[in-house]
Amino acid sequence: MVVVQLFVIGADMLFVFIPFILLLVIAFPADAAVPEQEVLRFEILRNEKPFGFHEIRFSQDGNQVMTDISIEMTYKFGPLTLFKYRHTNREVYERGALVSLDAQTNDDGKRLFVRAEKNGKELDVKTHEEDYMAPLTALPSTYWHTLYLDDDRLINTQYGGHNRVTVERSGQDRREITGVERDVVLYDFEDLKAGNKATFIYDLKTGQWVGLEMSIRGSELRYVRQTPLTGSAEYGQDYLAAQFK
């Protein structure tokens, strides 16, 4: 009975973890440099117990910015592994636009993939379930930049659909981030096709992504940022702070 419940929780929650993930800038300008922190890492907690990690590595080659995303989650009961999840995703951006994506997911034994490549004036998207063309303005559900705050559709990097989403600012709060009290802004996110919801947390001063929270079938999932914040929003305008002026 316990094993079945764990598997259901895993399947329902995973849309967020492909995400998400990481953000050093509020806007993504054409001349954006690789962030100072070339690696951004979160610990994932389930009911305040270690459950996995989410890591993003940044690199740059001329006008292209690359992000390599790795997510792993494991649940064990004694020596038995009851749930295991792994996701990798490489994104390439050129002058602020996505030009390619290659995502691979092993969802407790179920293998999924999503690939996208610029093809003329569109993105050619191929997945384990369907192929389709998306506009060049389409963004993936990785959330390391916050351009998605103004978008209503995202390419789901686990399942592959170009899904409709809603994002609403839900408030401002004080949170401890890597040992320091910070003012943060909360955004409620929902994937309308999957019906899943999560709250993304951003630092008010710098615009950096600092956390994530969601509830699913009695379990509380939380991202705890491990990488210290940089001092200012050096790679884009202070978009979040401007909304509160």
Image (spheres, rainbow, N blue to C red):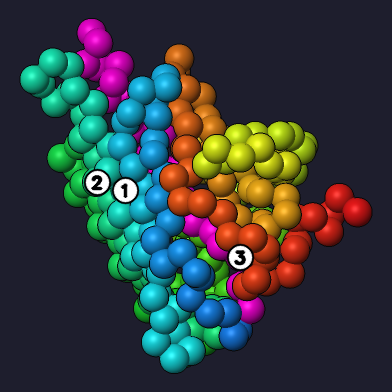
Tell whether position 17 is magenta.
Answer: yes
Residue behind mark 3: 25
Question: In x, y percent, where is residue 35?
Answer: 51, 70
SS of the residue at dot 2?
A: strand
Image point 19% across, 42% down: which residue? 110
Query: In this picture, is 205 found above or below 76?
Result: below
Question: In x, y percent, where is residue 48?
Answer: 42, 22
Image quarter in which the C terminus is found: bottom right
Residue 136 seen by the camera: yes
Image point 39% across, 75% down: which residue? 59
Q: Are marks 1 and 2 in contact (CB under 8 Å)?
A: yes
The numbered disc on residue 211 is none
Image quarter in which the N terminus is found: top left
First in residue order: circle 1 vs circle 2: 1
- The residue lying toward the viewer, choosing from 217 and 20, is 20
Q: Label 2 is placed on what type of residue?
A: Arg
Tell whether position 101 is magenta.
Answer: no
- The residue lying toward the viewer, choosing from 184 and 165, is 184
